[in-house]
Image (cartoon, rainbow, N blue to C red):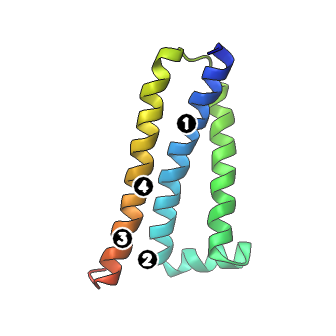
Amino acid sequence: MTSSLSSWVRSVAIAAMVTSVMLAVLIVSAEEIPALKDWLKATFTHHWLGKGALAIAVFIIVTIAARLQGKTDASKLAGIIFAEAVVAALSCAAIAGYFLLHLLKFV
């Protein structure tokens, strides 16, 4: 794999991790903080559109910022991609866990 491609893969993986955590925090926070959900609705016409727009913006910004940091050794990509999968799974688990607790009326 070329060095340039390795850097892009690394950058996108980092952006996916950051975006996944941001979305998990935003989803749970918007449910717990009515003012945040109201702001998302007022700004983007619907709170899910707001979360999506913010996620796209964060993903693009983090991808570009990570890409500008320099080159990556291709041998490190497997670890970065594994970390991305773990972070995404934990973010999904946090969202699902919150809504499960909400369904069971613990929160």
Q: Which amino acid, by three-letter code, is at mark 3?
A: Tyr
Q: Earlier in the sequence, mark 2 or mark 1?
A: 1
- Helix, strand or loop under label 2: helix
Which of marks 4 and 1 precedes in the sequence? 1
Element under label 1?
helix
Residue at 56%, 74% in the rendered image = 36
**Disc 2 from disc 1: Cα separation:** 29 Å
Label 2 sits on residue: 32
Q: CA distance from mark 1 to mark 4?
A: 14 Å
Dot 2: few (<14), some (14–19), or many (≥20) neighbours within 10 Å? Answer: few
Q: Quadrant of residue 15?
A: top right
Q: Which mark is residue 98?
A: 3
Q: Is residue 69 visible?
A: no
**Is the C terminus in the top left, top right, bottom left or bottom right quadrant?**
bottom left
Outermost residue to the bottom: 105
- The mark that comes first in sequence, 1 or 3, is 1
Q: Residue at x 42, y 55 (%)?
A: 91
* Residue labelled with disc 1: 13
| C-alpha separation, residue under disc 3 versus residue under disc 2 | 10 Å
Q: Give coordinates of residue 22: x percent, y percent.
A: 51, 55
The residue at which mark 4 appears reads as 91
